[in-house]
Image: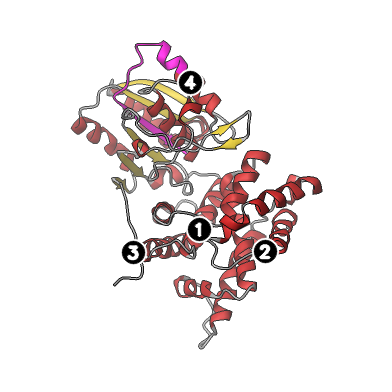
Amino acid sequence: MLKNNFNFELVTNVISGPYSIERVNEFLRKKKYKKIGLILDKNLCKNSKYIRNFLKTFKIKKILKKILYFDEIHEPTYQYLNQVVTELKEKKSDKFDCLIAIGGGSTIDHAKGIATLLTNQGNGLKYRGFPENLNPSIPLIAIPSTTGSGSELAYNAVFTDLKSKIKLGINTKNNYPILSILDPKIVVSSPKNVALNSGLGALVRSIDVMFNKKSSKISRIFSENSFKLLFNNLPKVLQKSDNLEYWSNMQWGAYLSVAALLNSSSSGPASAMSYYLSTNHNIPQGLGYAISGIYFFEKFHKKSFYEYSKLFDLIEKKPNKKNLSKKEKSEFVICSLIKILKYNKLTLKNDNISSNENKKIIEFMSKILTKVNSNNPVLLNKNDLKIVINKILEN
């Protein structure tokens, strides 16, 4: 009898490759969609000539009924979502049979919220969490401009309540995009900090999920391939940002990391830590997750968890020494991750989080320690938490 019994779900339809965004017209024609709403990242449109040229040709099709620009600085909020949907519902002429979202994870999540609320009564807060018995959402096509969030694959949509500072999202399987387009021509112009934060966040996710107690043998296969693509291509896109093959590898690495996460039930303590940092200090989710994850991995290693050695053979540039011990291989992986932080000067030290706030974070993480330990490869105690959290905030 199999020891590892599990369910596995993957709802996906992907078009990939340079200029693949142009194939959206063919897809819309086959599906007979004729009233399109476009949710577009405002900064992306401003900075990407490739996207502006696509819009020019797309407008000629006369099926584009409205463009909604997402220009929020941080992750989408229920309040902003409610405002947009209210305006759309007041204009009865704005009826869509399909939505297209082009942008980062926040833009795509915002579009998912719009797709759900336009076909259901009430505001976004009514549907926070995991709502059931909903009317079908408006079909959504997701075209990501970053290589991190994986929102183009997931049914989750992250939203924060400005009043309570609680992030619950609108998470329904109605949110699954009917099509995802991974066009490296879109992400190739990503600013270095966006590429670094999103890519490193996805890389940490792949490791986090792989060594989670609730991972399955299939989710680990996705994690391994995700790690290999992200770890080996992240430095390449940072050094040679115009190489489309490297960027395509990054897109698929991020995609596979989310496929692994969706089928492992949960992630580690870095996820909770990044949640607190993003809702209370507006620290980008990818950055907070990356820094937190790496220092938690280091703590696990120091507590004699050497399974990171399994990642050693997936790394292209590594020591040519033979007969390295499991501990030495694991240490090389951890040191390589920390080196990425140090080399790129990724730190939360400049965010000036006060010592009093530091105590609040430790208190928050301590309250969920039992839950966190149920997923961790190694049990942490409160003193371990204190050490890691101080390191995250002070390095």
Q: Amino acid at mark 4?
A: Val
Q: Does 369 sit above or below residue 61?
A: below
* SS at circle 3: loop
Q: Position of residue 177 (x, y in %)?
A: 34, 39
* SS at circle 2: loop
Pointer 2 with pointer 4, Cβ within 8 A:
no
* SS at circle 4: helix
For marks 2 and 1, give the CA distance. Answer: 26 Å
Which residue appears farthest toward the right when viewing the image? Answer: 355
Among numbered discs 4 and 1, the one appearing first in the sequence: 4
Q: Nearer the viewer, mark 2 or mark 1?
A: 2
Residue sitting at x 55%, y 75% = 306
Q: Position of residue 220 (x, y in %)?
A: 40, 64
Q: Nearer the viewer, mark 4 or mark 1?
A: 4
Q: Does 139 sit above or below residue 2?
A: above
Write down the residue under mark 3.
5
Of 290 and 345, the residue lying toward us: 290
For marks 3 and 1, give the CA distance. Answer: 26 Å
Q: Does 208 sit above or below residue 319?
A: above
Write down the residue under mark 4.
84
Write down the residue under mark 2.
381
Residue span colored magenta:
86-104
Left or right of 373? Residue 382 is: right
Q: Nearer the viewer, mark 3 or mark 4?
A: 3
Pointer 3 with pointer 1, Cβ within 8 A:
no
Pointer 3 with pointer 4, Cβ within 8 A:
no
Q: Amino acid at mark 2?
A: Asn
* SS at circle 1: helix
Q: Amino acid at mark 1?
A: Leu
Write down the residue under mark 1.
203
Among numbered discs 3 and 1, the one appearing first in the sequence: 3
For marks 2 and 4, give the CA distance. Answer: 45 Å
